Amino acid sequence: MPLGSLANRQGRLLADILGGSPERLAPVAGAMGLRVFDTNIAAVGLTRARALAMGLEARSAWWCGFDRAHYMPEAREIALHLVYERCTERVLGVQAVGAGDVHKRVDTATQLILRGARLSDLAAIEHAYSPPYAPALDPLAVVAMIAQNQECGLVAVPPLADWSGARILDVRHPEEVTARPLTGAEVVCVPQERVRTQSATLDGSDWLVVCERGTRSSEVASWLLSRGIRANYLGGGLRWRALARHRGAAFPPAAAR
């Protein structure tokens, strides 16, 4: 990794070696960050493609939300992609993008990855919580919990997956559906709070449950599975698709808090 931070560490290391100290360079996870106009980007470790190419049984988890309490005026949106090894639940990499503070999350993930952290370690991280600085649950912890749910059978579909031909259950509120309607797919709209009373109208066919950010849809998918109805949900929610300007996103990318 040709970065100034590592180069400075190597310079000090070289001086120690020349001075007679038997030092070695500590492990490197490959943390990086940059800004593209108003978008912050940060990453560490392996991407899923790289992990699969190395022969690892890699899986992904996605999360989309805010870098601090969503009701704070300075809250900004961020999206996280967590890569982990399925058999050991070892954290392999984290990629983050958004207008908010993504580097804070990647810096934390870097220290954990270097120490061989697993999903349980990431889910249990402690952070300095205060609404102006962070949500009550840090985004890193949330995406780790999403991965743990996945290992328990609640599977997320990749946010940019092709859903043509899928039966979509949209559990957003009516005003959300009106403001950002979905097109180009078979869509049934049932608000989350009405799913239990209207589940009789949902047959046993596979359902892709969607909501704005993946929280409500994951809860509904879990409930449907417990009732014997085949379902999964869209990882990261519809907002992830809109952030990526994916052509499958049929609504404008206006932030919904």
Image (spheres, rainbow, N blue to C red):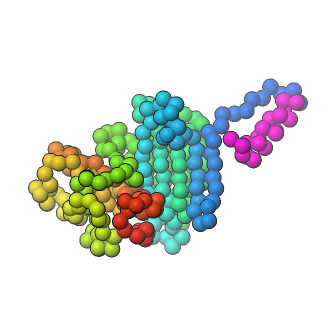
Would you place residue 85 above or below residue 192 in this image?
above
| Residue 202 lies in the magenta stretch | no
Looking at this rendering, what residue extends furthest in the right direction? 19
Q: Residue 143, percent across and down?
A: 44, 49
Q: Residue 40, percent across and down?
A: 59, 59
Residue at (59%, 52%) from the top-left corner?
42
The magenta-colored residue range is 1-18
Q: Nearer the viewer, residue 129 or 53?
A: 53
Q: Residue 255, percent across and down?
A: 43, 69
Looking at this rendering, what residue extends furthest in the left direction? 200
Would you place residue 192 above or below residue 51 in this image?
below
Q: Nearer the viewer, residue 74 or 6?
A: 6
Q: How many marks?
A: 0
Residue at (57%, 48%) from the top-left corner?
43
**From this viewpoint, is residue 120 visible?**
no
Q: Which quarter of the figure is the N terminus placed in?
A: top right
Q: Residue 60, percent across and down?
A: 43, 43
Q: Toward which corner of the image does residue 210 lie, by quadrant?
A: bottom left
Q: Nearer the viewer, residue 16 or 31?
A: 31
Would you place residue 22 above or below residue 126 in this image?
above
Would you place residue 134 above or below residue 155 in this image?
below
Residue at (66%, 34%) from the top-left corner?
27
Q: Main secondary structure of the magenta part?
A: helix
Q: Which quarter of the figure is the C terminus placed in?
A: bottom left
**From this viewpoint, is residue 98 visible?**
yes
| Residue 8 lies in the magenta stretch | yes
Q: Is residue 38 left or right of residue 66?
A: right
